[in-house]
Amino acid sequence: MSSIVSFGSRQLRNAVLFAVVIVSLSFGKTDLLVFLLSGQSNMCGAGVVNELPAELKKPVDSVIIYLASEGDANKLRKWLTLEPGFGSSQLNGGKPAFGPELLFGKTISDSLPGIKIAIIKDAVSGTSLADNNGWRPPSSGGSVGTLYSNMMKHIKDAFDALDTSKYTIHMGGFVWLQGEFDAMNNSQADAYETNLTNLIKDIRDTLNAEDLPVILPMIDAQSIWSQHAKVRAADIAVRNKLENVDTLDTKGFETDGIHYKAPGVIKIGRIAAERWLAMDYFVPVPVIPVSRNTMRPVVMSAKDLSFIDCAGRKIKIHRNDISDNRINTSSGFMLVVKNGTVFQKKLNLTR
């Protein structure tokens, strides 16, 4: 499968350069951390904008969003500043709507001050992961789902619409909120674990990001979805067998019986972002440019090097901590030199 983007996630995943004094690998470009949000109606979002507290009704200036499918026609397929209104008003009686993207983007942005965030949102109501008309991934065999194929095109179009003279793209993660439709069909529910595993594999392959972080908000346990237990169990099974996958349980979040109300949508977006921020990841740290075409690892001067990590922690590297291409810190992190770049590895994580 051809990849949409040409960079590897181990060098570029989850963030850009968090140094106190940054020497950017992109030589003056703005590093752009990109997330893909996809699924069906609860990812589209039925949250009513007027029910948001005042502080959440403001634009999030450090986040841009590309709405690919369902939502306000005036906002489709263009990069815009994130704000309330990128949900699907057809789900709540025509009222301006928001989805998980709002709190997801705001929470990530608040946690990574100074970093530009981008969200590609491609969600369609009433759709299946198993169907050929839905999100069926190539690795599941048979005809590839129409929505899956559309999503690949939308991702490419979104990247093409970015000014590459201005931005350097870094894939941050994938959030998938879907499964209600499959939970209404016994055979589709039985196949959900396989199809979800294949979806993650195929998206990682296409984005050339073999360890792309994935967050799976689990569907609610509503009786209308008779096989919800199978789909929820499939999410957990995929989390347990694949690297860099985590879940969040939405059971009990405020709904109208099908769609999450504003407080539930807020929780999903915020907690999904918190799960991402807590995940294991590699983060590039500053390197010293020798020329535009050659890089070498961090060179220690008489002073210790300090930088800020994804979780906002200040970490110091002492000169005597460097040995055998590994920089050990006392803060639960290890730095590893890989292909001329220093990466931060978060250690001893618990779910």
Image: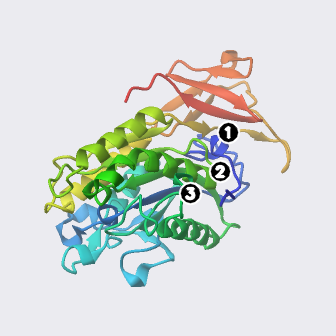
Neighbourhood count class around disc 1 (C-alpha, 10 Å): few under 14, some 14–19, many 20 upward = many
Lower sequence index among marks 3 and 1: 3
Q: Name the residue under label 2.
A: 208
Q: Is residue 141 above or below residue 146?
A: above
Q: In this view, does 189 lie above or below 341?
A: below
Which amino acid is tagged 3?
Pro
Q: Residue 286 carries which label?
A: 1
> Residue placed at 40% from the left, 83% from the top?
73
Lower sequence index among marks 3 and 2: 3
Viewer-closest of 166 and 340: 340
Find the distance from the CA under tag 3 to the CA under tag 2.
16 Å
> Looking at the rendering, which quadrant does residue 131 occupy?
bottom left
Neighbourhood count class around disc 3 (C-alpha, 10 Å): few under 14, some 14–19, many 20 upward = some
Q: Split into 4 quadrants, where in the image is the C terminus?
A: top left
Q: Residue 138 carries which label?
A: 3
**Left or right, residue 54 beside residue 83:** left
Query: SS at mark 2?
Result: loop
Which amino acid is tagged 2?
Asn
Viewer-closest of 275 and 117: 275
Which is in the foreground here, disc 3 or disc 1? 3
Which amino acid is tagged 1?
Pro
Q: Is residue 237 above or below residue 320?
A: below
Query: SS at mark 1?
Result: loop
> Residue placed at 40% from the left, 54% from the top?
176
Viewer-closest of 318 and 34: 34
Residue 33 screen position, x and y as percent: 55, 54
